[in-house]
Image (spheres, helix red, strand yellow):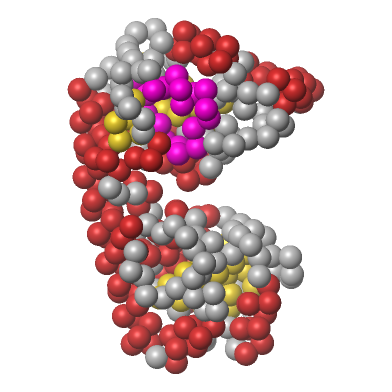
């Protein structure tokens, strides 16, 4: 994992000093203390299992749900979850968990890591991120009980759950969605809805499409569009205007959008959003330049950097669109069933600890 000297959780002294100074000024004493390794588990008795997440929402979301699953299996152990980005809406479910502590991670300075290891004295580790920092990776390589959720992150002496043959993110996807969203958006009208996940922002793509079909509505996730758009958080539940560009600034709407659009396109696939799109049972295209797709999508037929031709076909031929959507949903469930097996294996490993 490459980091810059400005990284607040890296190992460069100047970046850490600047981060400490900023935290003091803003009253974030807990973040400062955690960065230097001053961690403490909740409760007085029981083995400590340390779950490590990074800064990515996908990793934090998965780590939280995994912690809850472990807690249901093991009431006797103490659980600790650390992360580098505090996302309150993703961490809220932890309020229901006893003997569970969570907060910021230590930085990658060896002294901070040693202090954290000594204070927590973990019996085992579960790594819920593939972006391990170098010194932390080295220290984990010497631990006897480490489970990596990503097989590519596992070193000698560590294990990956079922060799990570499935993406556990699929377990977090809402697979059954009430179809009323389309009716709410259209208010009795017959028109097409579309979804682009576009973190690289190619506004000419969707403006050209809406110029051709000015009555359609386009949803955009990823980066915020630079042009005029309606944040869905400000939507008043009335019919959306023709040619509206709607920015999905609240992730809770993703399942409804995925199940309501005629088709979606991912110019840069994000794991959670991509699985949600597959689960939506609607047609899906992916940028041809995408280098890494889930293994289950290795032979995905609809890869293109110009989705308008595919969208045109799916718009005019509902049967073809439905067939594409059915295939997407089959692949999602194939991955999800395997993920359930992987999770069960992981929980059995932790149970044996």
Q: Position of residue 143 (x, y in %)?
A: 36, 18
Quarter occupied by residue 327? bottom left
Please, which residue is most extreme toward the bottom here?
316
Quarter of the image that includes the N terminus:
top right
Q: Position of residue 70 (x, y in %)?
A: 30, 30
Image position of 133 (left or right of 293):
right
Residue at 34% x, 46% y: name it: 168
Determine whether 126 is above or below 60 in the image: above
Span of residues in magenta = 124-141
Residue at 74% x, 65% y: name it: 226
Asked whether residue 207 appears in the rendered view, the answer is yes
Magenta stretch: includes residue 297: no
Q: Position of residue 159 (x, y in %)?
A: 29, 31
Residue at 30% x, 43% y: name it: 164
Quarter of the image that includes the C terminus:
top left
Asked whether residue 285 appears in the rendered view, the answer is no
Q: Nearer the viewer, residue 187 or 244?
A: 244
Q: Nearer the viewer, residue 168 or 157?
A: 157
Image position of 16 (left or right of 344):
right
Determine whether 189 is above or below 4 in the image: below
Determine whether 214 is above or below 118 in the image: below
């Amino acid at each position: 994992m490459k980091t810059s000297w400005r990284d607040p959780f890296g190992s460069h002294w100047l970046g850490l000093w600047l981060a400490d100074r900023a935290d003091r000024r803003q009253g974030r004493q807990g973040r400062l203390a955690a960065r230097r390794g001053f961690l403490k588990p909740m409760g007085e008795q029981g083995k400590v299992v340390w779950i490590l997440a990074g800064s990515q929402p996908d990793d934090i979301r998965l780590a939280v749900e995994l912690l809850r699953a472990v807690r249901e299996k093991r009431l006797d152990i103490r659980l600790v979850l650390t992360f580098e980005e505090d996302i309150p809406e993703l961490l809220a479910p932890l309020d229901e968990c006893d003997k569970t502590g969570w907060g910021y991670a230590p930085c990658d300075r060896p002294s901070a890591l040693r202090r954290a290891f000594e204070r927590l004295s973990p019996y085992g580790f579960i790594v819920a991120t593939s972006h391990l920092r170098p010194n932390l990776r080295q220290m984990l390589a010497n631990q006897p009980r480490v489970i990596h959720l990503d097989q590519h992150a596992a070193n000698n002496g560590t294990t990956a759950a079922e060799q990570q043959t499935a993406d556990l993110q699929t377990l977090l996807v809402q697979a059954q969605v009430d179809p009323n969203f389309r009716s709410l958006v259209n208010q009795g009208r017959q028109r097409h809805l579309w979804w682009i996940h576009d973190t690289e922002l190619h506004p000419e793509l969707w403006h050209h499409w809406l110029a051709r079909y000015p009555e359609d509505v386009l949803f955009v996730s990823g980066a915020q569009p630079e042009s005029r758009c309606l944040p869905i958080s400000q939507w008043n539940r009335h019919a959306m205007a023709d040619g509206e560009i709607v920015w999905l600034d609240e992730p809770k709407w993703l399942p409804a959008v995925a199940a309501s659009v005629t088709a979606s396109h991912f110019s840069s696939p994000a794991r959670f959003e991509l699985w949600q799109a597959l689960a939506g049972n609607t047609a899906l295209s992916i940028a041809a330049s995408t280098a890494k797709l889930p293994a289950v999508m290795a032979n995905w037929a609809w890869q293109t950097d110009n989705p308008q031709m595919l969208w045109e076909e799916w718009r005019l031929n509902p049967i073809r669109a439905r067939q594409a959507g059915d295939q997407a949903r089959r692949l999602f469930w194939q991955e999800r069933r395997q993920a359930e097996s992987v999770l069960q294996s992981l929980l059995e490993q932790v149970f044996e600890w």
